[in-house]
Amino acid sequence: MPFIHKEKCFEFRRRLEQVHATNRRDPSVKPGHAEVLIETGWRIAISEQASPLVMNVARDLQDYLLVSMRVSVLLVQVPSLSQAVKNASRMILLGTKENLPALGRGLSVSRSYRIVCSAGGMVVCGCDERGVGQGSYFLEDLMNLREAPILKCQDVTRAPVFSPRMTHSGWGIDQFPDAHLNAMAHYGFDSILVFARGPDHCTMGYQDFNALADRAATHGLDVYLYSYLRSLKHPNDPEAEAYYESTYGALSKACPRAKGIVLVGESVEFPSQDEHTTGRPYDAPWKNGLPPTKPSPGWWPCRDYPQWLQMVKKAVRKHNPRAEIVFWTYNWGWAPEADRLALIRNLPKDITLLVTFEMFDPIRREDVTHVCVDYTIAFEGPGRYFETEARLAKKRGLRLYTMSNTGGMTWDFGVIPYVPVPFQWARRHTGLLKAHRQWGLSGLMESHHYGWWPSVVSELAKWAFWNPHMDAGKMAAAIARRDYGEMAAPLVQKAWQTWSEAIRDYIPTNEDQYGPFRVGPSYPMIFQPNLSRQFGAKDLKMPAAWHAWCGSRIVLTNYAPLDDPRQSPGSSRVDVEIRTLRRMADQWERGIELLEKSLKITPQRKRATGARLLNMARFMSRFITTAIHLKEWWKLNRQLMIERKSRKINRLLDQMARVAEREIRNAEETIPLVELDSRLGWEPSMEYMTDAEHLRWKIAQVRAVLDYEIPEYRRATDNNLIRQ
């Protein structure tokens, strides 16, 4: 890659913290008819009473013009913006409708804004302070697309469709540097999510929640606490009220400015009395040493969840009366519809229902059935689980949110910054907007702990989730021209389109998303019938950083289909999955070839952007190869464990050796890709899992299988230890 250099671990954070790209300006672009050029010497004007948020916005715009457009402007404060508007010349005025009542009269939606550009200057009038910010960022968006500090003379009013738009950190789990907060605000998010184990206690230890809320507010962002507080008392317990005051009440008291709290079954399990459940946490010791025959309360729509929610709500709102209680039904979308809807019919009306958009739908491929798992963009949604619960939420008047992943990342590829299939994402955007119209969908959770990365995907989401709505095809074309140049843009769009079709051949399964598609070519290949157990499936865990929250705990290394009664068994599914993945691989390679061609005609100053995308696309191709190899490997392992004739055993071992050698080459060819981009191979909760070090570990592991375990099995076969 001639346009990007090798990076050390975590060097990607330097890029992530650069909110304004340098030297975006194309000096050949000149203003046309009815356009205004912002030049050095202009002024940005705000009120003398401007809040810290508006001050931040003004400084940000000043920085943008200097860094991205090489224009130096002054920042001034004026006694009256209304008076300044009358005499504005070579000036950008930033204010709320309180500062500019004549301009802001029609604004009523939080974060909405009106922009008036004329030959003499321009005004950004926000419905509120956050609207000022979004209006200023929109000016940046327009200038970026123009590649010049040039704006059309216009009078436009825009309003957001969804609020909140929540995201976790992409910088590090529960870590939010100011630059990352600023970038989130630029991309249209209005809220962040932080995992809460207790007051000022997050996944990484101590976190001053109040300080985080203060910093987030200066960028126009709210804070939602994602609860990891276990509930050890049933609401009927005489000590329950005191207990929940000591947990949820204490959390709310410690951070009273949190916008709300998110509750999901597996993270907040309580001792439900629902007869369909064990009544105990999923990690509780087995009774009488026997495995449970029922789900734990976190995985069932328990009839007493409404009672539990009332208890939690009382404790939280004692200290924060306006706190939002967000109840997520993620864990039991598989359950019978009647049981799910019975719960929703009894939920308190003053809580918010959160439903995952695409999960649990049956996917029919050839003659087998798969069940859509979390979280994927292979199926754009909505799924029936979402539709049924959304329909009832509207009927009951419940506020409705969804987990949409529209920050751009899913579990389809676990250690990349985003999935570059913009036209497939656009199909999801269309579904979300339809759900807004049909069922009143109003808020989005746009990432889980894999966080968020600025990309064409999140940029298209921003354009889609505002009124007036911008066409995805036109916006993708404009972004491609901006980032790759006029000549290369059509080829880049074709690459995006090709990948957007390829992803539809991806079949999301639990074994893949917890296996080869979670970590890619660093995923081990276990010789399942090995005799020594030295490298056995039971004991093999991928190396993980000492400080990782999840590390390798969320990687299942003993690859095998995880059968579900709602889908065809793994033995019949795996051949279909191999065929679809091979189709996907072919299409993915065609997209890579298109991008390679585009780079040859991309202007020099823009080639680094294309080079990084190309490097990531090649990295993703290696994931697909690994997944195919693991499915072939599983089939051979399975045949080997039931075969008793030495001639056939040796033939199977020869086939396994060839698959293993191909996978070693795949891992070796991945090493240069991750060395060029330190974000590849990393995920916030797992930390590095597919860097060069892990890839070399995997190569050594597979070499051990080839050099020791397979030969040992051959000797046992030859010595009649296995043969019938």
Image (cartoon, rainbow, N blue to C red):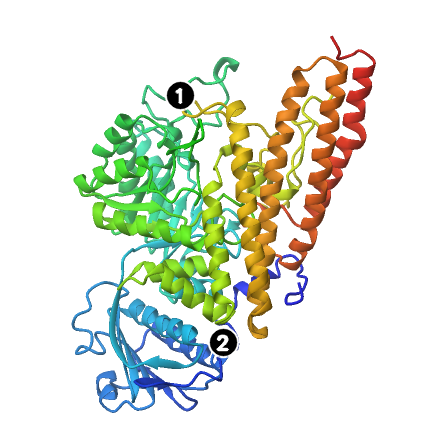
* Quadrant (top left, top right, bottom left, bottom right) of the N terminus: bottom right
Whether residue 320 is visible here, answered yes or no, is no
The residue at 79%/16% (across/down) is 717
Asked whether the viewer can see residue 647, the reply is yes
Mark sitting on residue 24: 2
Q: Quadrant of residue 107?
A: bottom left
| 659 relative position to 250: left or right | right
Q: How many marks?
A: 2
Indicate the amino acid at tag 1: Thr
Residue at (48% x, 56% y) in the render:
496
Q: In this view, does 616 lie above or below 55?
A: above
Question: As shown in the figure, which amino acid type bears the numbered disc 2?
Answer: Arg
Residue 694's tag is none
Q: How crowded is mark 2: few (under 14 residues within 10 Å), some or many (20 or more)?
A: many
- Residue 565 vs residue 261: left or right? right
Residue 47 picture location, percent across and down: 29, 81
Quarter residue 698 falls in: top right
| Distance Cα–Cα, label 1 vs label 2 | 59 Å
Residue designated by label 1:
278
Residue drawn where x is 59% and y is 60% of the image: 596
Q: Quadrant of the C terminus?
A: top right
Location of residue 318 in the rendering, given as x and y in whole percent from the top left corner? 27, 46
At which x and y percent is residue 666?
68, 44
Disc 1, SS: loop
- The answer to which of 128 and 373 lies nearer the viewer is 373
* Residue at x 37%, y 71% (from the top left corner): 137
